[in-house]
Image: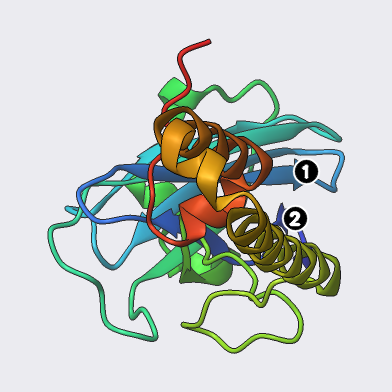
Amino acid sequence: MSMGDLISIHPSELKFPFELRRQSSCSMQLTNKTEKYVAFKVKTTNPKKYCVRPNSGIVLPGSSCNVTVTMQAQKEAPPEPCRDKFLVQSVVTPDGTTSKDITPEMFNKEDGRVVNEFKMRVIYIPANPPSPVPEGSEEGTPPRASSQENANQNFEEVSFFLFCWLTRKCCLCFSPFINYYWRSYYSLVIYFVFHLFPNLMQNLGIKIFRGY
């Protein structure tokens, strides 16, 4: 919060969420710290780029006024740091003054008139900040699989090859029957392989389609 003789301004700098071709806004609050009527006026070094509402007004004693600053959609990324600036001027006015009574001459420093001024800088922040990189992995690389996932995969692979070894032994022992029933037998083997080890089949690049 910035403190002046007449008003306090919060925040002390304007932060705009920046995204190309999108309008963005931020606000500031002006609080009258005196027991007098205070007039304010907001100026900017780039009036075509920003819209201030209200850009001037009266803040009653002990009260506050919210000011919204809107940045027009930009086609190009702005330079860093941003060179745009805002100036908030404030001056004491007679009691009963309204916004309609404000004139540009009220903020001239001629004839010994005291005009408080506060400069504000502009900061652009990413509208969608990048996701944090998981701990233990480098940026740009996929996160490593957990030890539990690796253990499950290893167990499934060992089980699969053990199943194949037992199947081969059965084929050697019962070869006469297999020659006769080979169609139904191998259909049964394929069924068990696909349903007992679906994840492994997917890892091998085989797409499984279940009809139930």
Image coords of residue 71 (percent x, y): 32, 49
Image coords of residue 161 (percent x, y): 66, 67
As rendered, which of 171 and 112 lies closer to the eye? 171
The crowd level at tag 2 (other Cα within 10 Å; few <14, some 14-19, many 20+) is many
Could you tell me which secondary element the residue under label 1 belongs to?
strand
- Say above or below: 40 vs 114: above
Report the coloring of the rendering.
rainbow
**Residue at numbered disc 2:** 6
**Does residue 159 appear in the picture of this structure?**
yes
**Direction left: furthest residue:** 75
**Quick one: quadrant of the N terminus?**
bottom right
**Does residue 208 appear in the picture of this structure?**
no
As rendered, which of 50 and 140 lies closer to the eye? 140
- Asked if the residue at tag 1 contacts the one at tag 2, i.e. Cβ–Cβ closer than 8 Å, the answer is yes
Residue 172, quarter of the rendered image? bottom right
Q: As drawn, is 91 to the left or to the right of 185?
A: right
**Residue at numbered disc 1:** 32
Q: Which mark is residue 200?
A: none
- Say above or below: 178 vs 50: above
Which one is earlier in the sequence, the residue at label 2 or at label 1? 2
Image coords of residue 5 (percent x, y): 78, 63
Could you tell me which secondary element the residue under label 2 belongs to?
loop
The crowd level at tag 1 (other Cα within 10 Å; few <14, some 14-19, many 20+) is many
At a point 53% along the width and 61% down the height, the residue shown is 15
At a point 55% along the width and 32% down the height, the residue shown is 188
| Inter-mark Cα distance, 2 to 1 | 6 Å
- Say above or below: 28 vs 9: above
Residue type at the position of mark 1: Asn
At a point 28% along the width and 68% down the height, the residue shown is 45
At a point 83% along the width and 74% down the height, the residue shown is 147
